[in-house]
């Protein structure tokens, strides 16, 4: 187990390189199951969820070759590895995602669509809920059944089979990111045309569609609510660079704001962050687009409160809600945060209250009053983005903050303490048994 020890109160200064997007890399890695040829992915982040996915693919019989190409990084610039992974599913022996893997990463369900499309069968442990909500996969199953698959439950496993998937019109009752990705992958090899209606529009969905198109898929409308896929008989290998992680970038923008620092973000994609940039400017941060892949953010004047409601893309991302909450504990006034995507995504609020924040949770809303001087304390991380928000709070707090269970943050942030140290933060990772 690891913990972070943070001495707060230091304005962060310098340049940080943003890593590849975990939530784009996960579906792109699953897509390698759709062909027997090698799929080359660049800019893969070194985070736990990627390691879990690689382990899962290897248990299926996929050959994985990795190379670590680290970007140049001087003392001033933080380190971001840009790993290259070559996956080849030409000797798949199993179609089962075991419980011990799925329980650690529910995105393992992303292999359902590809396995059914290519091999006509799949056995995936029903992912349990997690700290932020029930996280069902009913919409994945319903969509795949529309394409002709049949499912039954067996000892906690979702067991699916399909002779040949057939194109269909699928309407998602709720917008689902990995549901859209699962069905998009399945539809590429289905007979005929598939229409995905009320589809997710996230950049990560678009990045997956870009890879699938390079592999020979026939896709129109990715990034809009209606995606049209014309099935093909076979897909071939491809070489694809994963997009930058917009949530990591948003987290470092928040770090600049909460510490009243001045940060330059490189290898990011400002266009994927527009609503976050607009909101951070609204509360008084200065954010300048330096180029198509770099931003500068600083906050030298007091922040002002502002409300948010989390929405599907292009709305304010739920994965930035916890980080925003930490930031507005420092803003003058009352900010109302409405979490509309997940039913239990305020666990970080209670930990911030222990650091002196003035936050009241009322159902799906959190009311934050500021500014307050946070004070360092021992806190416990509960999920990936909650952990990031506690790091942000610790960076702003007076004194020492100890964050337990940082394995949550390692799931989605690449060596975050090294990146923070390189821009002036006093943060240490302590490993203990
Ligand atoms: C993806 O999760 C992301 N994970 C999440 O990021 C992100 O928070 C979420 O999208 C929302 O943007 C990956 O991409 C790997 P959903 P996903 O299906 O696809 C309900 C992080 O921090 N729903 O879009 O699982 C669901 O319960 C993670 O990186 C159903 O009811 O989320 C939720 O309320 C956390 N039935 C809503 O839809 C279903 O079959 C949106 O969920 C599927 C989803």
Image: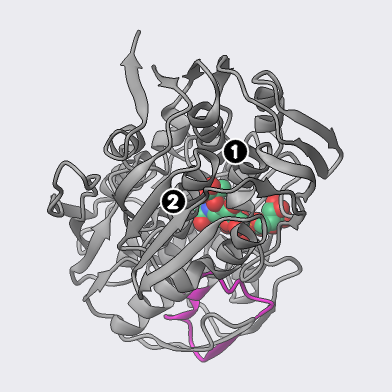
Residue 176, picture quadrant = bottom right
Q: Name the residue rendered at 52%, 33% in the picture.
A: 387
In this rendering, the label closer to the viewer, 2 or 1: 2
Q: Residue at x 31, y 86 (%)?
A: 216
Furthest toward the top, the residue is 433
**Secondary structure of the residue carrying numbered label 2:** helix
Residue sitting at the far front = 301
Q: In the displayed image of the protein, which residue is found farthest to the right?
A: 362
Which sits earlier in the primary sequence, circle 2 or circle 1?
1
Crowd band around label 2 with a 10 angstrom C-alpha radius: few (<14), some (14–19), many (20+)? many
Task: Look at the picture and state if 384 lies above or below 253.
Answer: above
Please provide percent x and percent y for residue 181: 51, 68
Q: Position of residue 117 (x, y in %)?
A: 44, 71
Q: Which residue is mark 2?
A: 248
Q: Quadrant of ligand 1?
A: bottom right
Kindly tell me whether mark 2's CB lies below 8 Å from ligand 1: no
The numbered mark at residue 156 is 1
Q: Nearer the viewer, residue 359 or 309?
A: 359
Q: Quadrant of the N terminus?
A: top left
Residue occupying the point 66% across, 55% down: 283
Residue at disc 1, secondary structure:
loop
- In the image, taking residue 147 as reference, residue 41 lies left or right, namely left
Tell me, for residue 221, which label it has, or none: none
Residue 235 in percent (x, y) is at 30, 81
| Distance in Å between CA atoms under marks 2 and 1 | 34 Å
Please state which of residues 72 and 29 is positioned toward the viewer in this rendering: 72
Range of magenta residues: 184-202
Residue 389's spot in the image, x, y percent? 56, 36
């Amino acid at each position: 187990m690891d913990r972070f020890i943070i001495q707060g109160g230091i304005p962060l200064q310098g340049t940080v390189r943003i890593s590849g997007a975990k939530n784009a890399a996960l579906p792109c890695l699953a897509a390698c199951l759709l062909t027997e040829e090698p799929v080359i992915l660049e800019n893969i982040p070194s985070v736990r969820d990627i390691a879990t996915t690689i382990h899962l693919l290897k248990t299926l019989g996929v050959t994985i070759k990795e190379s670590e190409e680290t970007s140049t990084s001087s003392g001033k610039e933080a380190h971001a590895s840009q790993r290259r992974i070559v996956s080849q599913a030409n000797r798949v022996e199993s179609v089962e995602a075991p419980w011990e893997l799925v329980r650690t990463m529910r995105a393992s369900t992303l292999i359902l669509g590809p396995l059914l499309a290519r091999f006509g069968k799949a056995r995936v442990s029903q992912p349990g809920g997690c700290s932020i909500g029930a996280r069902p996969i009913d919409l994945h199953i319903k969509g795949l059944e529309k394409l002709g698959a049949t499912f039954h439950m067996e000892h906690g496993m979702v067991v699916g089979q399909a002779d040949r998937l057939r194109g269909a019109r699928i309407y998602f009752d709720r917008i689902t990111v990995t549901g859209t990705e699962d069905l998009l992958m399945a539809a590429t090899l289905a007979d005929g045309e598939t229409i995905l209606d009320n589809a997710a529009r996230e950049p990560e969905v678009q990045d997956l569609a870009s890879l699938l198109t390079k592999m020979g898929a026939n896709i129109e409308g990715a990034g809009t609510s209606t995606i049209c896929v014309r099935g093909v008989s076979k897909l071939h290998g491809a070489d694809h660079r994963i997009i930058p992680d917009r949530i990591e970038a948003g987290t470092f923008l928040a770090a600049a704001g909460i510490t009243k620092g001045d940060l330059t973000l490189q290898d990011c994609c400002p266009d994927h962050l527009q609503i976050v940039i607009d909101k951070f400017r609204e509360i008084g941060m200065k954010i300048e687009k330096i180029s198509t892949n770099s931003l500068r953010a600083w906050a030298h004047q007091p922040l002002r409160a502002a409300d948010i409601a989390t929405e599907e893309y292009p709305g304010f991302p739920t994965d930035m809600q916890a980080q925003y909450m930490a930031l507005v504990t420092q803003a003058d006034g009352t900010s109302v945060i409405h979490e509309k995507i997940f039913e239990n995504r305020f666990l970080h609020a209670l930990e911030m209250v222990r650091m002196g924040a003035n936050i009241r949770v009322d159902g799906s809303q959190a009311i934050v009053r500021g500014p307050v001087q946070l004070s360092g304390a021992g806190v416990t991380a509960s999920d990936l983005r909650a952990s990031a928000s506690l790091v942000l709070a610790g960076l702003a707090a007076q004194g020492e903050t100890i964050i337990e269970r940082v394995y949550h943050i390692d799931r989605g942030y690449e060596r975050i303490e090294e990146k923070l140290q390189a821009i002036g933060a006093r943060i240490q990772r302590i490993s203990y048994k």
